[in-house]
Image (tube, rainbow, N blue to C red):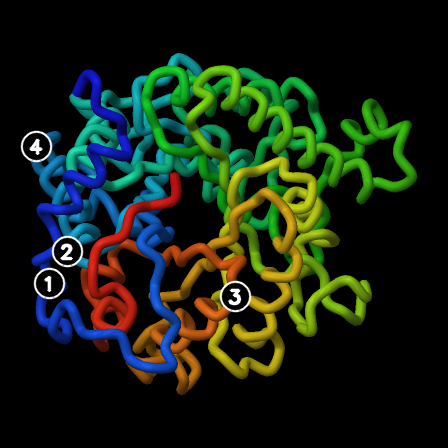
């Protein structure tokens, strides 16, 4: 659309959707209630669309290209009906690709066979179809996970991990690239930036997997890499954090060079450090701390403005004894205050009505209360929901309640 800005196009698209109602949700256009924060005309309303193990899409491997595309566009249509405005589309779940990549094989989650061409370009189509609906498309990459098993022989013979076995670490029943090898970092960045070069994605998105989550009784074997590259650091932990810092800063620089309008966001586990570990940490007692266990200094990335936005996964209910939603959001608002990094809150829609979830999650209003609470902080610019399958199913009406209470009209995503 020559001569028309993406923002103007989004406004035009949104103007055609103001009458769309979220299925059987409460009536659209509900008037603002006194005491409830008024939602901004511009805010993040995102939805993760996970492809790993066919979590959200495609529904199973081996569907025809036509059926895969129909399923994908149906999910985008559902996002529009719920007045969402951004989709975080997982396009590199396990060192593979949902686009024709010169670096990595086609994902097995499309055809059932790693490396087999699905007959179409899912990322290219997703960008086109999302933009046609006024949605942003954030391309979601997992940097280091190779496989959800420990057998390299199950990878396609052309896989880089088979060509470079020294890059690979088995841990916790999975295979990972070793973040401590500079050649690995260069390769991962090249694989990611290939998509940025080819497609007008609105953002590059990372999730919470950097160094893997700790597994009791197991050690992530990076001795050789540490011996070769860790000499200038006071500890292995400091070296590991520097490896992840370099991934973040170098990816950010590559995005800005190749496509300056594209943003870079990260969605980490929500506890940087507990206050008992570090006085600057949150009033939490989480069993995992990103700084110490995943070697991801998420607070520094925000305060140094290395990334454009952060979406901590605040996947606990209000009042949780180990990590209270209210306390975690308060901590992140403080961490983001005065920085140039935008803060959105990751919401555990998948918990709503789930068997075994805390009693609060059996209440359809719990998620809506999250938005009311988070909306009281000027630093919070919106919310992102995990994940697409749960948006569609909406088993106890929690998402419909959010839309009725907080999304009476469409909103533009942050520019």
Q: Which residue is mark 4?
A: 66
Residue 295 visible somewhere in the drawing: no
How far is the residue under mark 4 from the one under mark 2? 22 Å
Label 2 crowd (10 A; few <14 / some 14-19 / many >=20): some
Marks 2 and 1: in contact by CB < 8 Å? yes
Q: Which residue is mark 1?
A: 21
Q: Identify the secondary structure beneath mark 1.
A: loop
The picture quadrant where one finds residue 188 is: top right
Q: Residue at image x 71%, y 58%? A: 217
In the rendering, at what x and y percent does residue 250 appear?
Answer: 62, 24
Q: Which residue is mark 3?
A: 377
Q: Nearer the viewer, residue 96 or 4?
A: 4
402 shown above or below 107? below
Marks 3 and 4: in contact by CB < 8 Å? no
Q: Earlier in the sequence, mark 4 or mark 2?
A: 4
Q: Earlier in the sequence, mark 1 or mark 3?
A: 1
Q: Residue at image x 21%, y 71%? A: 404
How far is the residue under mark 1 from the one under mark 2? 6 Å
How far is the residue under mark 4 from the one under mark 3? 44 Å
Residue 137 is labelled as none
In the rendering, at what x and y percent does residue 215 appear?
Answer: 64, 56
Report how many numbered discs are placed on residues in the image: 4
Q: Earlier in the sequence, mark 1 or mark 2?
A: 1
In the rendering, at what x and y percent does residue 349 appear?
Answer: 34, 66
Q: Earlier in the sequence, mark 4 or mark 3?
A: 4
How far is the residue under mark 1 from the one under mark 3? 28 Å
From the viewer's perspective, is the residue at label 1 or at label 3 nearer? 3
């Amino acid at each position: 659309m020559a001569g028309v800005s993406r923002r103007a196009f989004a406004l035009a698209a949104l103007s055609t959707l103001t009458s769309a109602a979220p299925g059987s949700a409460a009536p659209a256009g509900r008037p603002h209630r006194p005491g409830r924060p008024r939602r901004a005309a511009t805010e993040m309303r995102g939805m993760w669309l996970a492809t790993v193990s066919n979590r959200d899409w495609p529904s199973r491997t081996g569907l025809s290209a036509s059926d895969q595309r129909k399923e994908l566009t149906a999910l985008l249509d559902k996002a529009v009906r719920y007045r969402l405005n951004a989709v975080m589309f997982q396009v590199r779940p396990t060192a593979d690709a949902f686009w024709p990549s010169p670096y990595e094989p086609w994902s097995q989650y499309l055809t059932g066979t790693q490396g087999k061409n699905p007959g179409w370009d899912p990322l290219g189509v997703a960008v086109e179809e999302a933009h046609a609906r006024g949605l942003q498309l954030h391309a979601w990459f997992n940097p280091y996970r190779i496989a959800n098993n420990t057998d390299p022989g199950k990878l396609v013979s052309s896989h880089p991990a088979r060509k470079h076995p020294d890059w690979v670490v088995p841990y916790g029943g999975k295979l990972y690239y070793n973040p401590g090898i500079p050649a690995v970092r260069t390769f991962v960045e090249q694989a990611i930036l290939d998509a940025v070069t080819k497609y007008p994605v609105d953002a590059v998105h990372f999730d919470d997997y950097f160094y893997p989550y700790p597994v009791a009784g197991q050690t992530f074997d990076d001795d050789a890499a540490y011996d070769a590259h860790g000499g200038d650091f006071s500890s292995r932990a400091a070296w590991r954090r520097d490896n992840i810092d370099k991934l973040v800063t170098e990816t950010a620089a590559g995005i800005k060079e190749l496509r300056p309008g594209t943003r870079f966001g990260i969605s980490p586990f929500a506890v940087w450090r507990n206050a008992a570990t570090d006085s600057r940490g949150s009033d939490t007692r989480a069993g995992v701390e990103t700084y110490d266990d995943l070697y991801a200094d998420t607070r520094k990335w925000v305060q140094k403005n290395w990334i454009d936005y952060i979406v901590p996964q605040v996947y606990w209910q209000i009042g949780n004894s180990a990590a209270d939603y209210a306390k975690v959001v308060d901590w992140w608002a403080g961490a983001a205050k005065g920085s140039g990094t935008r803060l959105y809150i990751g919401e555990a829609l998948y918990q709503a009505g789930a068997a075994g979830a805390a009693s609060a999650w059996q209440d359809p209003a719990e998620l809506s209360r999250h938005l009311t609470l988070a909306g009281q902080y000027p630093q919070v610019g919106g919310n992102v929901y995990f994940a697409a399958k749960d948006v569609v199913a909406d088993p106890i009406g929690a998402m419909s309640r959010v839309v009725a209470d907080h999304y009476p009209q469409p909103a533009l995503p942050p520019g």
